Amino acid sequence: MLIGAGALGFMLWEPHIEGRNAQATLFEIYFKDPFLAYAYIGSIPFFAALYQAFKVLGYAGQDKVFPQAAVKALRTIKYCALATIGFVALGEIFIVLGESDDRAGGVFMGVLITFGAIVAAAAAARFERIWRKGPGIL
């Protein structure tokens, strides 16, 4: 829950201190910046995957290690990670083709997010494969 709360807090706080929005009103910050709106829409798969991860941890905490719902949650996590990669890739195109003088920071952040999403998708796919085979595999 701390990761989700921290991510949401950062997403709401950061636009107020960012260079071009430092003197802007709330309306200008949140409704006149298409990239910011895209970032908020692109964050939906992250929060959906986080919710599914809590569900999987809840099943493990209840000693329900191999229910079909856990396999479905892992599949959802995998698809959310792939959706995040897609959103980041389109965002990177927006950054590279934009008019910014400092593209390197945005591109690097995109690479970091993509790497994390690839790791999450691979782990979810691996655990899904293991859990689909059942308790005899461990």
Image (cartoon, rainbow, N blue to C red):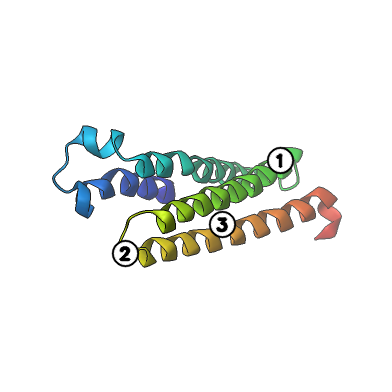
Secondary element at tag 3: helix
Q: For the residue carrying disc 3, how many other residues have a C-alpha within 10 Å: few (<14), some (14-19), or many (20+)? A: many
Residue assigned mark 3 = 117
Residue 6's spot in the image, x, y percent? 36, 50
Secondary element at tag 2: loop
Residue assigned mark 2 = 102
Residue assigned mark 1 = 72
Name the side, left or right, on which 37 lies relative to 75. left
Which residue is most to the left?
23
Front-most of residues 13 and 102: 102
Name the side, left or right, on which 49 lies relative to 63. left
Secondary element at tag 1: helix
The C terminus: image quadrant: bottom right
Name the side, left or right, on which 98 lies relative to 76. left
Residue 46 appears in the figure: yes
- Asked whether the beta carbons under mark 2 and mark 1 sit within 8 Å of each other, the answer is no
Residue at coordinates 38% horizontally, 53% vertically from top-left? 98
| Distance in Å between CA atoms under marks 3 and 1 | 18 Å
Q: For the residue carrying disc 2, how many other residues have a C-alpha within 10 Å: few (<14), some (14-19), or many (20+)? A: few
Residue at coordinates 71% horizontally, 48% vertically from top-left? 65
Residue 13's spot in the image, x, y percent? 26, 46
Residue 63 appears in the figure: no
Residue 2's spot in the image, x, y percent? 40, 50
Mark found first going from the N terminus, 2 or 1: 1
**Where 26 sits versus 83, above or below?**
above
Identify the amino acid type marked 3.
Ala
Residue at coordinates 51% horizontally, 50% vertically from top-left? 90
